[in-house]
Image (cartoon, coloured by chain):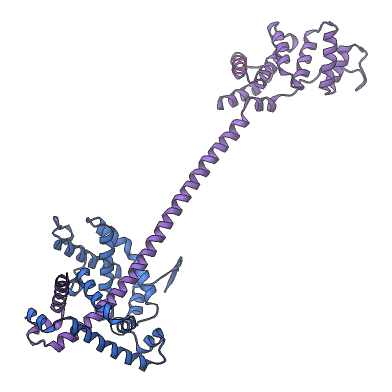
Amino acid sequence: MIEKKRNIIIRYLKSLLETHEHAKSQHSLNEEDLADLITDESIRSLGRSELRQKMHAIHNDMIAREKRRDRLKWILLLVAVFIGVGGFLLIKSIGSKTDAPANIYAAYFEPYPSLFEQKNGNEAPVDSSILSQAMKAYANGQYKLANEAFQIAENQGIDFNQPQRFYRAMSLMSINQTEKAIEILLSLKNEGGGPFEEQVVWFLSLAYLKTNQVDKAKQMLRATVDSTVSHFNRKEMVEVLERLSLN
Amino acid sequence: MMKRAGNRQDYTDEEVVRILRKRSSEEDKVIEYLYTTHYGMIKKLIRSRGGNDQDVQDIFQDALLVFYERVKSDDFKTQAKIGTYLYTVSRNLWVNRLKKNMKLVHDDMREERYPALTLLPKDQLTRAEENAFVKLILNALGDDCKKVLTAAVYLDKSMKAIAQEMGYDNEQIARNKKYKCLQKLKKIIEESIDLTALLNELR
């Protein structure tokens, strides 16, 4: 082991001397010169060793910084992906909420205006029957009251004409009793709709949307839009169909 | 004009050479600047020619040492670009190492795309040989002597600067210390190496 180490040192010093200007005249090199030479080179080697240590420390710092930077890049990338995906899902969720059938219903449903005639402005009608009271309440926007009056009339077995049945359905839709409204509107449609034939189609479609019967609503709206160029709320029907097609 | 990039100071080539030549206290910052600025380029060079990360580190540090010593000994032409210089030295050191290791099958690095640069044998002393030699000296020399001799001879610092660094009262103490340490080192060498035998081997 000692011999091996000695050989390494000798090899080093030999190669060192080859580089030295004295190498040209090695034959004149005495022990004193050699000692001086090796002393100089020792210091040089010590200096190199110190500089290498500095560079080693710089290298380690640099690699550590690069690693930190790489880690930060990954974190930022993950955050960006997370934000991107989250944002996409959020937008999708907002979009789907906006165009949910119930929301379309809310955007388009308005109770059909009362055609009930009042002789003196807000005064009570001359006909004070329960159906008249129901129609008056409806005209005043008192849909709950109108509905109660319609219910009493129904319980009393009073016959409703087609407009009264239509308004009965309207008052039911206004207080969110949509299923029952659908029954009435459907029966009116089957009978041809009477004076509110076109309105019945529109409101029945909306009622289907409210109860999430989207296919029935689409089918009815599509058939109407395709078969007529002028229809009650045709423009709105097209809009609703477009919004439904986005879902 | 020096610029600051993040926490690191940027230097022009002229400033680097000037600071290294005048033994400025800014030397460490300059070395760090050189290291972090040019490492990537040498990494590409060595990795594209079959070297691994350790090879890159060894070759680049050796090239930087060659540059440092050439600047210190006024043997560096200030017209040369430091990046090109380091690239050329690294390339030559790597070719030499490959040749030594008999790994060089296709010597595509011989193409003269870069300025010719002759490496002196002293630039190519192997690290293992040098390390063994340094360890031998270090074990016997002591830390203070090592610092004083390195600063005075290798780094070429003034006695005033050495006195400040080492906490001596004045330059004369630094000068005396340097002399004593040189004598000590010489003695260590005379005691550890059979100079007569070495001379005979050399002749």
Q: Decide which of A214, A139 is in the foreground and name it.
A: A214
Q: Decide which of A89, B101 is in the foreground and name it.
A: B101
Q: Would you identify the image quadrant in which residue A37 lies?
A: bottom left
Q: Residue A199 placed where, x, y %?
A: 71, 16
Q: Is residue B34 above or below residue A161?
A: below
Q: Would you identify the image quadrant in which residue A216 lies?
A: top right
What kind of secondary structure does the magenta stretch mostly adopt? helix
**Chain shown in blue:** B
Q: Is residue A189 above or below residue A109?
A: above
- Find the magenta span and give its range: A218-225
Relative placement, left or right, of B75 versus A169 is left
Q: Residue A153 placed where, x, y %?
A: 85, 10
Q: Quadrant of the C terminus of chain B?
A: bottom left
* Residue at 32 percent of width and 82 percent of height: B151
Asked if residue A220 is among those painted magenta in the image, a careful observer would answer yes
* Residue at 92 percent of width and 18 percent of height: A124
Q: Residue B14 placed where, x, y %?
A: 34, 76
Tell me the colour chain A is drawn in.
purple
Q: Residue A139 placed where, x, y %?
A: 84, 20
Q: Is residue A108 visible?
A: yes
Asked if residue A209 is among those painted magenta in the image, a careful observer would answer no
* Residue at 35 percent of width and 82 percent of height: B23
Q: Is residue A174 above or below residue A126?
A: below
Q: Quadrant of the N terminus of chain B?
A: bottom left
Relative placement, left or right, of A156 versus A90 is right
